[in-house]
Amino acid sequence: MADVIRRIGLSLGADIDWPLCFEGMMKQLDLRIPEEKTGDTIRFEVERVYIEPFDLRQPCKYDVVIDRLTHWYHTSREWIKKAIIMDGLYVFNNPWSVQANEKHTTYCAMMHLGMPIPDTWMIPPKSYEPTPDLRPTLTRYAKLFDVRKIGDKIGWPMFMKPYDGGGWRGVVKVDDPESAYKAYDDSGKSVMHLQAAVAGFDRFVRCIGFGPQTRCVLYDPDAPLHDRYTRQRDFISKAEEEHLRKVTLTINSFFDWEFNSCESLRRDGVWYPIDFANPCPDSQVTSLHYHFPWLVKAYVRWAVFCAATKRKMRRNQDWSPFYEVAALDLPYEEKLDRYCAIADKRFETARFEEFCHKHLPHLDEVAWEFFGTGAAKDAVQQKVTALFPPHEIDKFTELFWSRIQEWRQVEGNGKGDGK
């Protein structure tokens, strides 16, 4: 019998607050988990992953890497891809999928699976980077089109937004042809989608998925960033919450995105997924505030489970099981049940829940205690200091801290998280 160390690497960019809380909670948990086959004791070390030159044959010392960089920083992405191929590293999320599957692909795939995605068109860019072949190509093959006619087919209002997303970058609501012409003129070299608005919706919910864990939050996109994730509870039924769980896990397992968020609008009782290619969603206390402790706990649970069980990376995406269900002559809800069954199998949901019950029963209590400490408040203040002007630091530190304390009163204290 011996101690076996599993190393969890944090590949970070501008992240400040959640890594500090993750590290603090892991230290406080001080886990010692019996290895199922050998009887050894598994312990955990958490390290920051640094950016540096690397030999392609150089071994990777980590068992799991939590990645917050590969969607934009290529050096880290290529190191992670090398470590998966050469060393069997487990990473969330799958870097090839993050690199290859943008919002356009996700719309197409989920339309094929039967999800009620609003009508969406792609249009060529307004302007182009000049290349030697550009003029002959456009002269011979580019058809003139009128945004007004597309809008008439889709219906007004509609949204114009980049096909590959980017944190609300370039998203414009257009109510009439004149505003559509202006938005298109302003879009420059971006390839854009035109998407029907879900007019008359009465709920906007963002469902965060982390492995098999989900949390539904009532979302207000018109509020300031620090108020968009509302603190309302019981805003949907348990059946609707389960429906959005199935939608989120279907999308995430389809694309091998273990950490992603799915936005859906409800109109006349139907949930329309509108934005669900967010495989590195916001993890900061300055936007999540009340929901921040849930997210840090989700990080801990999934990272510990993957490291302790030596979870294997799926190196190749396999969409066939989903397409086989899509081809069946079944109502959408029955298909969704089958999609989610595939997702639960891929995420090992039953095994994960058993693992957490057996080895992390004290996590709720540890989290409740930790988020009342000076170390947790310091993590909040560091993030606020990085984002806010000096005269607002104290004000917003206290605001976010008070919301975390509200979470401790409502959902913490060892009682588990509400939805």
Image (spheres, rainbow, N blue to C red):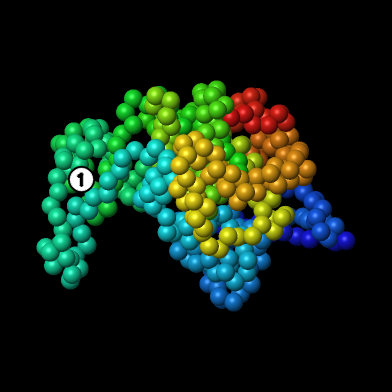
Drawn side of residue 195 relative to residue 366, left or right: left
Residue at the disc numbered 1: 184
> Is residue 387 in view from this perspective?
no
Q: In which quarter of the image is the N terminus?
A: bottom right
The residue at 16%/40% (across/down) is 149
* Percent position of residue 165, x then y: 37, 48
Image vertical order of residue 263 relative to residue 42, above or below = above
The residue at 47%/39% (across/down) is 330
- Please, which residue is most extreme toward the right here? 1
Where residue 93 sits, quadrant-wise, is bottom right
The residue at 17%/43% (across/down) is 147
Viewer-nearest residue: 332 or 155: 332
* Percent position of residue 37, x then y: 81, 59
The residue at 65%/49% (across/down) is 348
Image vertical order of residue 370 relative to residue 211, above or below = above
Q: Is mark 1 on a helix, strand or loop?
A: helix
Give the amino acid type for the residue marked by disc 1 in the picture: Tyr
Viewer-nearest residue: 296 or 110: 110
* Percent position of residue 43, x then y: 77, 55
Drawn side of residue 230 relative to residue 102, left or right: right
